[in-house]
Image (cartoon, helix red, strand yellow):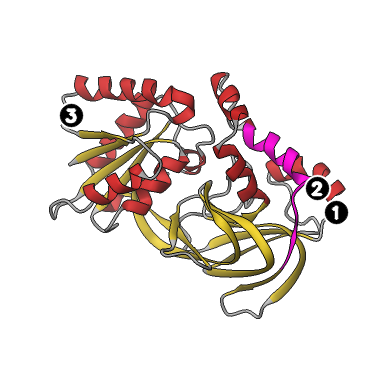
């Protein structure tokens, strides 16, 4: 069965227009489906939890919204073995769609999803997911794109309530919200000292940590290429850390970070691993796929290899 979870309020209301186009295409093709509209924060997770618990057959579940909506849906899925997941992007950043190479119109996205539904599950892309837990959390959070602590998380937290985002969305420049907020946050944010440890390695100390990001795809924050070589199907996370960089210098490094040209510069490090732990001497903001998780002093990031079947061709 084909289900849709729709966030009509995404991209400052643009989601409603996109869903109308998708509905028209579904009805023109006489496709049977059921659609549910989110009404409040966290609703997509509850809807996904209820839908994924129905019956005992395979479920095709499509998130129509931004990265936050997709993250809620993934965190609501009770059994990834029964679900094939799709997304029709309607958000500002759309980093999940970017990572999955989803382009074209909403109708074209729908046609690709329907084509993949008609093929055996094994011919669809099977991708890794990430999982983050932190001190005080009741349940680890799944992420598809990235999870991070520090500057990138602070920017995501600000973007969730930013009026600038609404203004830029209206002129189709919503992804620039993250760049502007990053510049505004660079000089005001506090850094922290940290102990970091990947699996089967000894803890390492880092002074003045600006951010530590566990990347499943190459880019977050509207296309900022934090880990240019990240591969969402290799069974590992790409962990990017920035530390010990004078604040005045970070401004000049920002264009290199956005372009993915920061690797090799002193103060940046990118390493692949299955699990990663960080302990801080003061709380910093934590996010998962741009969604605020809390201000924390400890976090553990883990890769869940080959966990999610996506309604995309396996040879994408």
Dot placed on the residue nearer the N-terminal end, 3 or 1 = 3
Q: Is residue 238 visible?
A: yes
Classify 10 Å Cα crowding around label 2: few (below 14), some (14-19), many (20 and above). Answer: some
In depth, the one of 100 and 191 nearer the eye is 191
- Does the segment drawn in magenta span residue 180? yes
Q: Which residues are magenta?
A: 177-193
Q: CA distance from mark 3 to mark 1?
A: 57 Å
| Residue at (85% x, 54% y) in the render | 246
The total number of labels drawn is 3
| Residue at (20% x, 34% y) in the render | 34
| Residue at (81% x, 61% y) in the render | 244
Coordinates of residue 312 in the picture (x, y in percent): 36, 43
Residue contact between numbered discs 3 and 2, judged by CB atoms under 8 Å: no
Q: Which mark is residue 31?
A: 3
Residue 237 falls in image quadrant = bottom right
Q: Which residue is mark 2?
A: 250
Identify the secondary structure beneath mark 1.
loop
Front tag of 3 and 2:
2
> Is 244 on the left or on the right of 122, as rendered?
right
Coordinates of residue 87 in the picture (x, y in percent): 37, 38
From the image, which quarter does the N terminus lie in?
A: top left
Q: Which mark is residue 246?
A: 1
Residue contact between numbered discs 3 and 1, judged by CB atoms under 8 Å: no
Q: Is residue 311 visible?
A: no
Classify 10 Å Cα crowding around label 1: few (below 14), some (14-19), many (20 and above). Answer: few
> Is 106 on the left or on the right of 157, as rendered?
left
Residue contact between numbered discs 1 and 2, judged by CB atoms under 8 Å: yes
């Amino acid at each position: 069965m084909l289900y849709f979870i729709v966030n009509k309020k995404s991209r400052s209301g643009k989601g409603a227009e996109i869903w109308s186009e998708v509905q028209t295409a579904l009805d023109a093709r006489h496709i049977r489906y059921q659609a549910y509209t989110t009404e409040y924060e966290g609703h997509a997770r509850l809807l996904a939890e209820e839908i994924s618990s129905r019956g005992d057959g395979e479920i095709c579940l499509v998130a129509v919204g931004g990265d936050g909506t997709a993250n809620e849906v993934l965190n609501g899925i009770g059994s990834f073995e029964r679900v094939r997941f799709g997304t029709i992007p309607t958000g500002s950043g759309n980093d999940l769609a970017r990572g999955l190479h989803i382009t074209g119109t909403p109708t074209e996205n729908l046609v690709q999803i329907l084509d993949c539904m008609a093929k055996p599950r094994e011919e669809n892309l099977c991708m890794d997911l990430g999982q983050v837990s932190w001190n005080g959390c009741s349940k680890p959070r799944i992420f598809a794109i990235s999870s991070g602590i520090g500057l990138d998380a602070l920017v995501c937290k600000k973007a969730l309530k930013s009026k600038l985002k609404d203004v830029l969305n209206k002129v189709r420049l919503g992804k620039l919200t993250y760049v502007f907020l990053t510049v505004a946050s660079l000089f005001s944010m506090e850094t922290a000292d940290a102990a970091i440890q990947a699996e089967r390695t000894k803890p390492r100390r880092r002074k003045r940590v600006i951010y530590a990001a566990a990347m499943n795809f190459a880019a977050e924050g509207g296309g900022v290429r934090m880990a240019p070589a990240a591969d969402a199907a290799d069974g590992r996370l790409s962990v990017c850390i920035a530390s010990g960089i004078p604040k005045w210098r970070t401004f000049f490094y920002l264009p290199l970070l956005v372009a993915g040209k920061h690797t090799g510069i002193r103060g940046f490090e990118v390493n692949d691993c299955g699990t990663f732990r960080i302990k801080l001497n003061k709380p910093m903001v934590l996010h998962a796929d741009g969604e605020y998780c809390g201000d924390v002093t400890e976090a553990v990031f883990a890769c869940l290899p080959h966990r999610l079947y996506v309604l995309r061709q396996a040879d994408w």
